[in-house]
Image (cartoon, helix red, strand yellow):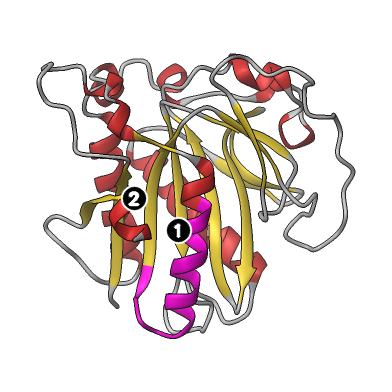
Amino acid sequence: MKMQFWSLRSGPARTEVKGESENDPSRLVTYAQTSELQKKLVELRASDEIPDTVLFVEHLPVITRGRGLQFTGALRPRHMPVPAQLPAGMDFSESERGGDLTYHGPGQLVVYPIFKLDGQSPHSPQHDVGAFLRGLEKVLISEFAALGLHAESRAEATGVWVGERKLVSLGIAIRKWVTYHGAAINVVNDLEPYHLISPCGFAPEVMTRLVDLLPEFALLKNTSDWRTELERRLALRWLGHVGASAASPVKVRLLSDLLS
């Protein structure tokens, strides 16, 4: 089953400062441009011009607000208004995804699956959004288990949890039975911005991140490598679920090239 995995960048990687790629601005892309790209890819996937595609992204700081829907389609209230004043350098965007308020920023890996729900692969159940979300959670939970972390899903709330702490936020949209938006994994990002909002209706203190849950894990100590390695591991995990493989599954792509 063919799939493709793209790691999005805003420009060529800056390599002149060895070991400081976590400070490289080319790692970060805007939420608005990524949303524009996703809509373009949805049309291409709906017409079978591209295979199922996964985008890996780190966003510039942004608070986003979804449509206030759970995957069941039931309306849920918006628990807290957007702050009147956001910190310098932080943006705000309305989003077509389900869910309510959340935060994206550097050090958080956002995963956007552009999948056609046509029943042609295990990760694309035919016209079943709930099953797709549970499948997405399963991929992430399986990878966390391989890293030595016990995580789980909850029947009453999408996302991935470790005990009472939320590690991954999920929110998707569907157009022509193609998915877009997806999952935000807290890796080494600052959790303080969550205190500006009520993330998906929860207290901000509920949010956690991989570096705090796996402090001994070498991948997270070397901040210049964590993104490349985590993207590779997730891509291989997805390919394994569909019985495929690839030596170097993730391709780095410039957002500007894909939007042109």
| Residue 240: x %, y % from top left | 29, 63
Residue stretch in magenta: 35-52
Circle 2: element type: helix
Which numbered circle lies on residue 141? Answer: none
| Residue 169: x %, y % from top left | 60, 41
Asked whether the viewer can see residue 137, the reply is no
Which image quarter is the C terminus in?
A: bottom left
What is the C-alpha distance between the residues marked 2 and 1? 8 Å
Q: Residue at the location (51% across, 57% down)? A: 36
Specify whether 132 is left or right of 232: right
Q: Residue at the location (64% across, 75% down)? A: 128
Specify whether 65 is left or right of 231: right
Near-viewer residue (140 or 228):
228
- Rendered image quadrant of residue 227: top left
| Residue 148: x %, y % from top left | 36, 33
Task: Name which residue type carries label 2.
Answer: Leu
| Residue 79: x %, y % from top left | 86, 33
- Rendered image quadrant of residue 244: bottom left
Q: Pointer 2 and pointer 1: residues touching (CB < 8 Å)?
A: yes
Report the residue marked by disc 1.
Answer: 37
Say above or below: 199 vs 31.
above
Q: Residue at the location (34% across, 50% down)? A: 255
Residue situated furthest front in the rendering: 260
Which numbered circle lies on residue 255? Answer: 2
Decide whether residue 65 is among the magenta residues: no
Q: Residue at the location (44% across, 54% down)? A: 139
